[in-house]
Image (cartoon, helix red, strand yellow):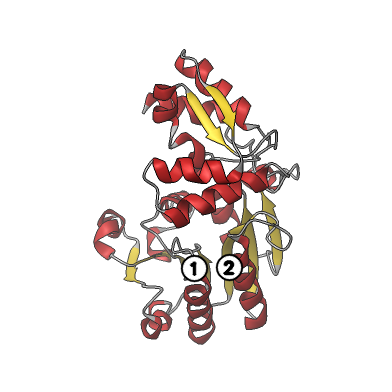
Amino acid sequence: MYAVTGASGQLGRLVIDSLLVTIEPAEIVALVRDPAKVADLAIRGVEVRRFDYDDAATLAEALTHVERLLLVSSSEVGQREAQHTAVIAAAKQAGVGFIAYTSILNADSSPIGLAVEHRATEAAIKRSGLTYALLRNGWYTENYTGSAAMEIAHGGVIGSSGDGRISAAARIDYAAAASAVLTDETVANATFELAGDDGFTMAAYAATLARVSGKPVAYTDLPEAAYRDALTGLGLPTPLAAMLAESSANAAGGALYSDARTLSSLIGRPTTPLATSVEEAVAA
């Protein structure tokens, strides 16, 4: 059986949808903290099991008969290492044969603070002895387009990325790659650096917003501290604002760029163009 953690989340749900294209529902397990959130999947025949990263004693039982597992990284920054380690231990106890993990682009060398817990998780997977695949995902285009309406309304995009190119891809692209790896039984102890085909600068992103919306939108580059303060001024919690500002500043040095094109190779098509993602966001 194939199992996906975080199945009610934005990425996990898309992976389940991708799996359903080629895999029978009865062969798929949706692992989720609140089963009610994926009741529609249960109706379609997917097996839904409660799976709470923080309830370690219950995890191995929830993985019974699972052969290939996708561990979608937790959204709880600061708690990820402990949560992921618990899942890895449970997978080994339950006899899972293969584990894929959604890490971060260039995790072993990335200067981005978020990479620390991803590196720790990758190391734990390797120590476990489980056969694995590391899916080192670049940034989601939705990280940017989620703010498109506000940016268009205010006529501006802010950040600290300078002229750094960002190889973002749509979440659906990464989901398709995860599904492809999870169902490919020839994959063993492999690392995939996954990113969009065409990198863009923040100025180019702002220009795309302007073109698609028909309204003036410009990019303003700020020092990291000023960007952090601007985000807190918009109501973001200080730790989240600091994380976003630090990631943006590191993008200026190329931390979010890759020209490997491994993602498009895995999914058998070009990654979703920035303009397409912007058009969808504006239409929504």
SS at mark 2? helix
- The residue drawn where x is 52% and y is 83% is 89
- 132, above or below 15, in the image: below
Q: Nearer the viewer, residue 97 or 259?
A: 259
Q: Earlier in the sequence, mark 1 or mark 2?
A: 1
Dot 2 surroundings within 10 Å: few (below 14), some, or many (20 or more)?
A: many
Q: Is residue 140 visible?
A: no
- 178, above or below 271, in the image: below
The residue at which mark 2 appears reads as 117
- 269, above or below 127, in the image: above
- The residue drawn where x is 44% and y is 49% is 14
Check the picture and name the quadrant holding the C terminus. Answer: top left
Callouts 1 and 2 close, C-beta under 8 Å:
yes
- The residue drawn where x is 39% and y is 83% is 61
Q: Amino acid at mark 1?
A: Gly
Q: Nearer the viewer, residue 231 or 76?
A: 231
Q: Which mark is residue 213?
A: none
Per the model, the C-alpha gap separating discs 1 and 2 is 8 Å
Q: Would residue 2 appear left or right of 251 to someone viewing this image?
A: left
The residue at which mark 1 appears reads as 78
SS at mark 1? loop
Q: Nearer the viewer, residue 137 or 238?
A: 238
Q: Amino acid at mark 2?
A: Glu
Q: Nearer the viewer, residue 263 or 22?
A: 263
